[in-house]
Amino acid sequence: MIITRVETFAVPPRWLLCRVETDEGVVGWGEPVVEGRAATVRTAVHELAELLVGKDPARIEDHWQLMTKGSFYRGGPVLSSAVAGLDQALWDIAGKTLGVPVHVLLGGPVRDRVRAYCWVGGDEPSAIGEAVTAQVEAGFTAVKMNASGRMNRLPTVSDIDAVVARAAAAREALGPDRDFAVDFHGRFTAAAARKTLPHLAPYSPLFAEEPVLPEYTHLLGDIVASSPVPIATGERLYSRTDVLPALQAGVAVLQPDLSHAGGISEVRRIGALAETFDIPLAPHCPLGPVSLAASLQIAFATPNFLIQEQSIGIHYNDGAEVLDYVVDPEVFRFHEGHINRPTAPGLGIEVDERAVRAADSTAPDWRGPIWRHSDGSFAEW
Ligand SMILES: [Mg+2]
């Protein structure tokens, strides 16, 4: 079997899918995208595809090595995301060729179902209680929200009160047997994070995510040491090398993204590395169906797995939804806040190719918002 063609599709709301075709009719799908940079990644995917066309798709590791290292300049979100999507597609082909789900190729299932959480917003603290209650009624056992909106470099009393108000509203709606996580979204300076985190302790969040930007990972150890709340990070780290300092800093949870961190091949290794630090994975996934399917394959094969992010029905998926691009949405159905083990070959989903082709190039050129502080200077979103 050889790879004959690689196609890409830019689809709403802001996703990029890749389709890898073989001469024997087996097709694999991947989701190589950086939110807000889909066109840039699309170009990278087609450059990397030159390494794949005419080659045996089963040589996944060799392809990963060449795609990742076969150029003097390597790494970073754009290239690692392009590799990630193509790697997912190669695993999809391998599973379909052998008639087994990818997690079986990774050693077989280590759990029967995967706990998932959903997003409940957080930009407006007043809306949190209602949003959380709706998800509890839908059966979820965990939710996540933003800790804040735009954040001052050192928070005022009311900045901190607003963070605490969100946590208190979530805890009240959840009771003692369910969890919420708060995403600091890199909006806080290290000092702001240290000042704020102790105020969250009475509400016992599952974790606080990205208390600082990834470029300040060298400060993470101090934050971990001073925080009574478990710290998570990882969605903006793209390889084993990138995650190592965060693991050494003692984070509680690592959040690699299957569409950013080199795909199934590299996240599998990141999971094994995290295991040596006794740290579980909570794969980041605000993206589309192929990214979620790849995340689930890792979740079912990784012993040190905690919980899965997903964005089905999320408010920011304007114009299209995760389930719009799969033939059978049943594979992503939630049962008491969990997803059952997919048994179909490959990534376990059938991409709705007609829907994808029809949606191609109708995606808006989505960009991340630009925020500014009250003095007009740049603020982290
Ligand atoms: Mg996040």
Image (cartoon, rainbow, N blue to C red):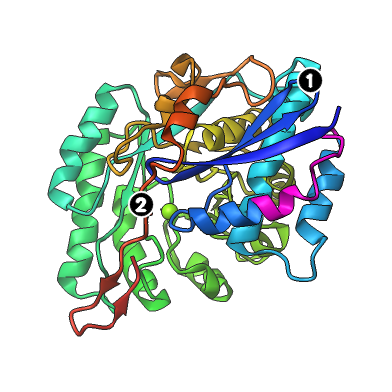
Which residue is more in the foreground, 228 or 301? 301
Residue type at the position of mark 2: Val
Residue 39 visible from this viewpoint: yes
Relative image position of residue 102 (x, y in whole percent): 71, 26
Residue on which the image places disc 2 = 182
When the figure is inspected, residue 100 is found, relative to residue 54, above or below; the finding is above
For marks 2 and 1 on the same chain, the one whose residue lies earlier in the sequence: 1
Horizontally, residue 326 falls left or right of residue 96, namely left
- Along the horizontal axis of the image, is 283 left or right of 74? left
Q: Residues within 10 Å of mark 2 (few under 14, many from 20)?
A: many
Q: Is residue 172 left or right of residue 143?
A: left
- Give residue 316's position: percent from left, percent from top: 30, 44
Q: In the rendered view of the protein, which quadrant contains the N terminus?
A: top right
Classify residue 210 as left or right of residue 52. left
- Quarter occupied by the C terminus: bottom left
Residue at 35% from the left image edge and 34% from the top image edge: 320
Main secondary structure of the magenta stretch: loop
Q: CB of mark 2 within 8 Å of CB of mark 1? A: no
Q: Is residue 238 visible?
A: no
Question: Which range of residues does the magenta coloring cover?
Answer: 46-58
Q: Which residue is mark 1?
A: 97
Could you tell me which secondary element the residue under label 1 belongs to? helix
Ligand 1 within 8 A of label 1's CB? no
Residue type at tag 1: Thr
Q: Nearer the viewer, residue 329 or 185?
A: 329
Mark 1, other Cα within 10 Å: few <14 / some 14–19 / many ≥20: some
Residue at 22% in and 66% down: 160
Q: Residue furthest left?
A: 126
The residue at the point 51 percent across, 55 percent down is 39
